[in-house]
Image: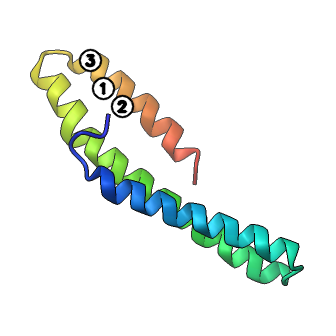
Amino acid sequence: MLRCIDEKDIIRRLRRIEGQVRGIVRMVEEDKPCEDILIQIGSIKAALHKVGQFVLEGHLHHCVLEGIQQGNGDEILDRLSGALEQFSRLV
């Protein structure tokens, strides 16, 4: 659930990333230098990481906080731990 974060901002960022990926496809099709392609891949990785940070921040401020306030702290912290583990694998 992305209720507490700016969904429009997340979607806008993901669409920009989608465009970057299409750009890399064109670069490969046009036989652009590998170095240029790698630079663009690095940019996409950084952009995806930033989106993940925004989602994680929203999760903390909404889902985690709400769960703790409702007395589900242990369950929420277990789920947060799992989410953090998955997110950290992306880097």
Query: Which residue is drawn at the image coordinates 57% and 54% (left, top)?
Result: 91
Label 2 close to label 1 by CB (< 8 Å)? yes
What residue is at 84 percent from the left and 83 percent from the top?
Answer: 32
Q: CA distance from mark 1 to mark 3?
A: 5 Å
* Colour treatment of the image: rainbow
Residue 36: percent from left, percent from top: 75, 82
Going 41% across and 61% down the picture, which residue do you hit?
A: 12
The amino acid type, in three-letter code, at marker 3 is Asp
The amino acid type of the residue labelled 1 equals Leu
Instruction: Residue 66: give its label.
Output: none
Q: Position of residue 58 (x, y in %)?
A: 27, 45
Q: Which mark is residue 80?
A: 2
Q: Nearer the viewer, residue 43 or 78?
A: 43
Earlier along the polypeptide chain: callout 2 or callout 3? 3
Q: Secondary structure at mark 1?
A: helix
Residue at the disc numbered 1 = 77
Whether residue 57 is situated above or below residue 22 in the rendered picture: above
Compute the Cα span from label 2 to label 1: 5 Å
Query: Label 1: few (<14), some or many (≥20) within 10 Å?
Result: some
Where disc 3 sits, the SS reads helix
In which quadrant of the rendered view does residue 26 lie? Answer: bottom right
> Which element is circle 2 on?
helix
The residue carrying pointer 2 sits among few (fewer than 14), some (14 to 19) or many (20 or more) residues within 10 Å by Cα, namely some
Quarter of the image holding residue 56? Answer: top left
Name the residue carrying label 3. 74
Q: Quadrant of residue 66?
A: top left
